[in-house]
Amino acid sequence: MKRTLGLTLLLFTVVAAFCFPHLKLDDASAYGSYPVSNRSTGLNYPTIQSAIDASSTSDGNIIFVNKGIYVENITIYKSIMLIGEDRAQTVINGNQTEIVVLITAQRVLVRNFTIRNGIAGVFVDHSNNTRVMDNNVVNCIPHTVREYGFQQGIRVQYSFNCLIQNNLVANNAVAGILVSDSSNFTVSRNRVFSNGLSTSSYGLNANASSYGVISYNDVAENGYDGIGLGNGSRFCTIIGNNITNNNIMNIWVDSGSRDNLIYGNNIIMKWVQAGVANNVLNQWDSGIEGNYWSNHTGTDTNYDGIIDSFYSIYANNTDHFPLSGMLHSYLAYKDQVVDVITDSGVDNLVFSESNSSVKMSVSSIAPDRTEDFCRIRIPHSLMAEPYNVTVDGVEPVYVNYTLKDDGASRWIYLRYSHSAHEIIIDGTQPLDVIPPAVSVLSPEYLVYTQNIVSLILVTDEETSWIGYSLDNVKNVTISGNVTLSELPDGPHELTVYANDTVGNMGRSETIYFTVKTQTEIPFIVWILLAALIIPAVGGLAILAYKRSGKQRGQGKK
């Protein structure tokens, strides 16, 4: 009997191994119609955490989450990309407990979610090269005194080279964004408002951190300060932010935080614009431009857009070039930015690459003036001299084409009557120093069931050389679209590079895809197989038992 049963079980094992070479027991439920999918393995899961925990989920995988509400507190301890289908409708609800999203792995991406209702929203802990982008992080409220003061909407600690970009961080009880004990970080283009229920909270702070960039954020109406540097933060740059009406002060620099550069910000508040602790020294202007301070009034007698008198923040902390109007920054072409300082309203700005011109509409916003001004910084890589400025098709009241030039950009200053106008600045085609834009149309962030994948790319200008790097291997030169063949099963990453005809090199976004040539068999087949084999095993066992009993009966005779 034992031999018969053993042979039957062996047969079952061999058949199962042949039919299901990749199936793991903890992934048995992954063949259902579930809302969370690992696009690198093709498996589906009922929850986000189960998709992360699955043994088939490995570093480099893409986990895609369909629209819906997921009541979970998740921990990301693998180097994955977690992407929601819709920023507003893909919701991770922390159910008023714990951290909603805890990241402890390296090279993680969290994108396109609404993350809400925990004691903290996103906590990046000892995680390097991680990106938190395009999320709504809202309504995180701690429940005990122990929790209070230690949790934020987004917190990054003991991490290197992390990017926090284009998030909405609002209505969190303690604070908006904190970067602590970290370096080489970037916090950019976030909206941070109405965070903090007490005066001990804040909008966006960096503590004991260095070599960070805090840029182009809108920070408003937070509990204590809008943007702060504390506990010895050094060599950070705060640039291009709109910091408005935070409850106590807009900028706070504290506790040995020195050697930081703060300029090009709009600082708007009725009361305290900025505060600085004793014996710390920071730079509040670039040597060309400082900040706009809403409570600093003064004359601009030399018509350069800079108030004649300095703005003193605290002892040894002075803005030597305070702006006489608010600063507006526009991404005009590729990565080229045009800065406009004006006491007008700016309705829009458009750059035409074909005829090298900037067009913008301005409107009057203060009734007590007869003239308004614009101070405009134009990169040489965008437009070259000579320039010609018109206001509604005619010469402006006053124009200075040579206000300032630092070798990379030219500053132009003009004045015009206090009214709505169309301003056009015409230039000439510049020397080409802008790299080509490279886009990869194929492969995509998908699973491919063949080991042959088409590489299809486009560039925005003529190229003299194109090459690609697959899985961080040295560049392979190509002349155009090619076929990538003999790709091994597993995750891959691809980056394409291109030189234009004058030698500027551009690169594509890195594309992550997976090759999986062996087809998974649905879990239902397991059930059918079991329905066929188990009765056969039982029948063989009964037959063997009867045969054994018959042999014992014959032996007694």
Image (tube, rainbow, N blue to C red):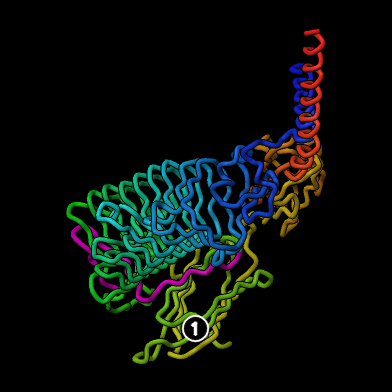
Residue 226 located left or right of residue 531: left
- At label 1, counting other C-alpha atoms closer than 10 Å, the crowd grade (few under 14, some 14-19, many 20 or more) is many
In the rendered view, would you say 245 is above or below 392?
A: above
Residue at 78 percent across and 26 percent down: it is 542
- Disc 1 element: strand
Task: Give residue 350's position: percent from left, percent from top.
Answer: 59, 75
Could you say which quadrant of the image residue 204 lies in? bottom left
**Any part of residue 308 in sight:** yes
Q: Which residue is mark 1?
A: 362
Residue 440 part of the magenta segment: no
Q: What residue is drawn where x is 48% and y is 52%? A: 163
Task: Return the residue nearer the eye: 68 or 437.
Answer: 68
The answer to whether residue 320 is magenta is yes
Is 409 left or right of 302, judged from the image as shown?
right
Q: Nearer the viewer, residue 292 or 12?
A: 12
Q: Which residues are magenta?
A: 307-333
Q: Is residue 437 left or right of residue 311?
A: right
Q: Position of residue 192 (x, y in %)?
A: 40, 65
Residue positioned most to the front: 557
Q: Where's the N terminus, which quadrant?
A: top right
Q: Give, as a three-letter code, the residue at label 1.
A: Val
Residue shown at 78%/34% (left/top)?
A: 535
Residue 450 percent location from the top left of the image:
81, 42
Q: Quadrant of the C terminus?
A: top right
